[in-house]
Image (cartoon, rainbow, N blue to C red):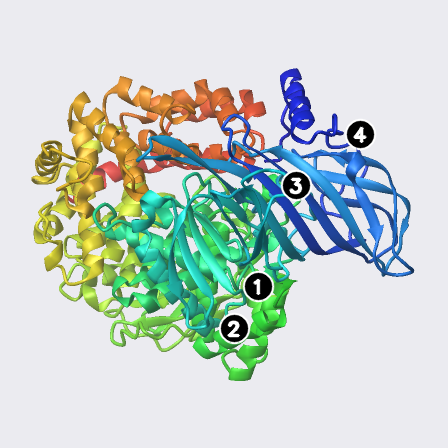
Amino acid sequence: MGLQITHTPELVMKWFLFFVLAIGQGLCASTANSVSGYNYYRLPTSLKPQKYYLRILTLLDNPDELRFTGTVKIVIEALENTRNITLHSKNLTIDDSEITLRLISGKGTRDICVSSTSVNPVHDFYILNTCEELLAGNVYKLSLPFSADLSRQLIGYYRSSYIDPDANVTRWLSATQFEPASARKAFPCFDEPAYKASFVVTLGYHKKFTGLSNMPVKETKPHEYLPDYIWTYFEESVPMSTYLVAYSVNDFANKPSTLPNGALFRTWARPNAIDQCDFAAEFGPRVLQYYEQFFGIKYPLPKIDQMAVPDFSAGAMENWGLVNYRESTLLFSENHSSLADKQDLAIVIAHELAHQWFGNLVTMKWWTDLWLNEGFATYVASLGVEDIHPEWNSKDRGSLYAIVTAFRLDSLISSHPISRPIQMVTEIEESFDSISYQKGSSVLRMMHLFMGEDAFRSGVKSYLQLYTYKNAEQDNLWESLTQAAHKTGALPTNYEIKTIMDSWTLQTGYPMVNVTRDYTAGTAKLSQERYLRNTEISRAQCVGCWWIPLSFTTQNEKDFGNTAPKAWMECTRTGESIPKSIQDLPGPDQWVIFNNQLSTPYKVNYDTQNWKLLIKTLNSEDFRKIHVMNRAQLIDDVLYFAWTGEQDYETALQVTDYLQRERDLLPWRSAFNNLKLLNRILRQTPNFVFFKRYIKKLLSPIYEDLNGINDTFSSLQHQDQILLKTTVVDWACQYQVSDCVPRARSHFRSWQSEPNPDENNPIPVNFRSAVYCAAIKYGTDEDWEFLWARYKNSNVGSEKQTILSTLGCSREVWILQRYLERSFNPKGGIRKQDSSLTFQSVASREAGVLLAKKYLTDNVDLIHKYYYPQTRSMSRLFSQISEQIITTSDLNGFRAFVTNSRQYLKGLNQAIQQSLEIMLTNVQWMKRNYHQFSVSIQQHL
């Protein structure tokens, strides 16, 4: 997004004709007439916007000329004397001759001339130099005309479309995506989160369309001179940041809901998908009410719309009062969407609506603290879904997912702190990752659990009330929480939340706590160090210390419900770890488990005897006496430690052996997350046969207990069991367990025999991913074409994604090559937002990974052009490949590719460094562990 479009002669001529015809004022000045010397990445602090009057005419009639023109009038207060106005503008044409500046307060009202304009293309600054000094305390109104094509990329003010099945024509619409820094691509503005202002939006468009914005419609009037066009005036907004402004012109239908506080709640979609809005229209208002109660603050706007946009790059976007979603994250079809789809959809809706408080009402001052938005929304979303659908067990499942996802990325030396310095737009975009979301969520959960319910909610409520309609930093949150914790007695008065939490947010990584017990004395010594997957890095080089709340229980107590800390691991003022001793522990026949319910994001390595005691319990009928979250923890921890050498694979496999008994979802999720990584390495080696037999050994008992691939979902008492069965069947078909593959192919043939397969699909909806993949992997060219036809004809976003993710299961090279080419062809039938999904679908399979890697390296210029200027989307293409490079020669080959393709990989440094480090850790694993693992696993068959 930070790169500039090259202005070719053809493009210059296009702009010339556009402005002569559309504006009728001759050739307008193209953006500005000189380059500015001001080069700091933040806006000057001399001015502050108070209000925007934003008027935009959107033209959707001609598909060859989808464009907009507008005027923004900004009421600006001068905080310091200044001779220029610096704001943001990118890829907009501004007619310098039409710019006006007027003093509207102070000593009289009068016009002030603009002597010249300049630009800083590095930071997207548009600078107006004034003929006289603007004086502190005065208020001015700046008027800027602007225009541009509706973007073909999915950022700024952009175009989207869908096929109307009744008329078989393309319907066009417009939508916005401004976060983090693309409001400047739609209108000139002070495009930083701290510059909050109110917005008065007016949209012009053909009367056959509907106009939506953050606020309700105030009135509608005919356009002055365009027949059948109207102006829709929206009410003035509350103060908000530019990245939350939103508007759309579309022909959608809506499903209204009711809110007890009288606010209007509507769910919008294209007319032929409105029947898929029922769940979102029912769930959305309920979770909004939950947040009103949880935060103790009413939703402040008079309405909220949630809209499914056919083309949308993010999963969803929390624009205040007009929340945008991908179709797959808002629309639900009982006949085509699985239980996992439904739960994922609920989590996304809950996440976006949580932002209406955390992010919108109170906003971070700068993108350094993006995690305050995303971590909080991620965490409280799981609480909201748990409150409304407790039968889903979403809180524990979400907590486990968050913590193990953060563990994976944060074990790399190339990871980053939760709160990180930001100086470029590309750095902002890099922060939208699992550190801000999942690790942010995990440390907030940790704090919630060690503070307790009353203190945590009191502190959060106080923080929101104190900074309503304002901006804040993480230290402001720490102050509110410390006061609440001390007031309720939840934290000793000599402890500060800032001291504790800064150790988790300001440094990279997480700790491994080593527990060494003295069984005779009944004590344990605890030490901490940063856990790293890269074994070439000395742990001594990575000094770090975390304030760790220590909860634990013993084999006799089994008090896993108590997540309050019994002790703390502390740090000195200079950041050194203080060793900790725990007293009154049981004897050598009793285990101890630290970190009850995985309440804090750290790993625990025990001495040999304690591991033996845990393994004995896990492999007995008493294994359920260990809490399900801690069973998941033990699996994750021991497989990490075996990877890096803190434990051997004999110990790890003794732990995973117990899975033959396990019938709960979370430990299996933990196991699959780790076994998947081993699979991607070992399937390239001669000893994969032993790994495959071991997986079959683990899976066969549970596959049979759950009645395999038979549709017995109605007999399962718990929702988790449905998800468990779905996951087990998926793995069972991958490893050809029992009758999984033949039954899957039989299901697929039944579907093919349907007279109308687009309307009637007899495959149980929760099995479809596994069935499609098995049918494509072991099927014919005709099977692939059948499924591709179903994709093209499907009207359901989640079903389309399921199909795209399984078409890559083919083992035919020519089919996979064609599929890759379609992914990055604008006319290939795959929307740009789904291109990375299709690439990953090929790259994640053994038959496709080499093809995908070669396609990426041979066509990086084409892929760059396809995504430009949103080239960060390319970062999603590296992950599947990086997990499957296991030799030094392949690693060096990829390094050479990166070096030789620098011009196409700008802005991707973080993703590339992390991918290279993952490849390196795979190479290290092969050298250090492959032989030992191969010997150990044969002993467990």
Occupied quadrant, residue 80: bottom right
Q: Which residue is mark 2?
A: 297
Front disc: 2 or 3: 3
Distance of mark 2 from mark 1, alpha carbons? 10 Å
Above or below for 194 versus 803:
below
Above or below for 73 versus 739:
below
| Residue nearer the viewer, 780 or 13 | 13
**Disc 3: CA contacts within 10 A as few (<14), some (14-19) or many (>=20):** many
Q: Which residue is mark 3?
A: 70
Q: Are marks 2 and 1 in contact (CB under 8 Å)?
A: yes
Q: Which residue is mark 4?
A: 33
Q: Which residue is mark 1?
A: 361
Distance of mark 2 from mark 3, alpha carbons? 36 Å
Q: Earlier in the sequence, mark 2 or mark 1?
A: 2
Occupied quadrant, residue 459: bottom right
Give coordinates of residue 767: x percent, y percent: 18, 44
